Amino acid sequence: MKESYHKPVGLTAEQHDNAREKARGLERDVAFIFSSIIIATPLEVFRQLGGIPLITSVRRAISNLTRDEILHKLDYTIDEMNGAPNHVWYIDKAKFEEVYGKK
């Protein structure tokens, strides 16, 4: 899997490594949520995570998983909070299992 770009301004090497590992952990959590519910919007995943990480972090994780071809973006949206449209993604179970193993 490719590394996500994170600008390490003002971080020590150790802080940067910790932030990178935390981002990888969120990607793993998001992938496992998708493996259970198959299709979802970023807001649905955010809610499944209990609203703990920032929604922008969830979106970045989804973007990274899409780049790695574990998730795929569908061509339609669902109107969610305040009527804002959110795209729907689905998981490639075979690619998920290749990267994370079977559940």
Image (tube, helix red, strand yellow):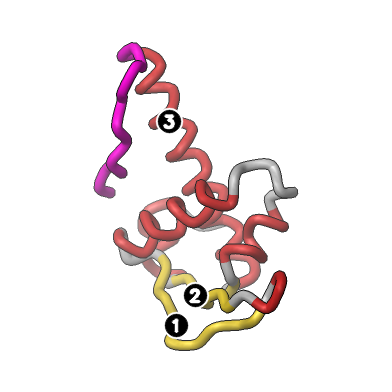
> Label 2: which residue?
90
Could you tell me residue 12's position as x and y percent?
A: 34, 12
> Label 1: which residue?
74
Closer to the N terminus: mark 1 or mark 2? 1
The kind of residue tagged 3 is Glu
| Disc 1, SS | strand
Q: Which residues are magenta?
A: 1-13
Separation of disc 1 and disc 2 at Cα?
A: 7 Å
* Image-quadrant location for residue 23: top left
* Image-quadrant location for residue 65: bottom left
Above or below residue 91? Residue 97 is above
Q: Are circles 1 and 2 on residues that touch, CB within 8 Å?
A: yes
The kind of residue tagged 1 is Leu
Outermost residue to the bottom? 76
Q: Residues within 10 Å of mark 1 (few under 14, many from 20)?
A: few
Front one among 86 and 63: 86
Above or below residue 28? Residue 15 is above
Residue 2 drawn in magenta: yes
- Left or right of 88? Residue 19 is left
Kindly identify which numbered label has been placed on residue 21. Answer: 3
Separation of disc 2 and disc 3 at Cα?
A: 24 Å
Residue at the image position 40 percent from the left and 74 percent from the top: 72
The kind of residue tagged 2 is Tyr
Above or below residue 77? Residue 56 is above
| Disc 2, SS | strand
Could you tell me residue 32's position as x and y percent?
A: 57, 56
Front one among 81 and 67: 81
Front one among 35 and 97: 35
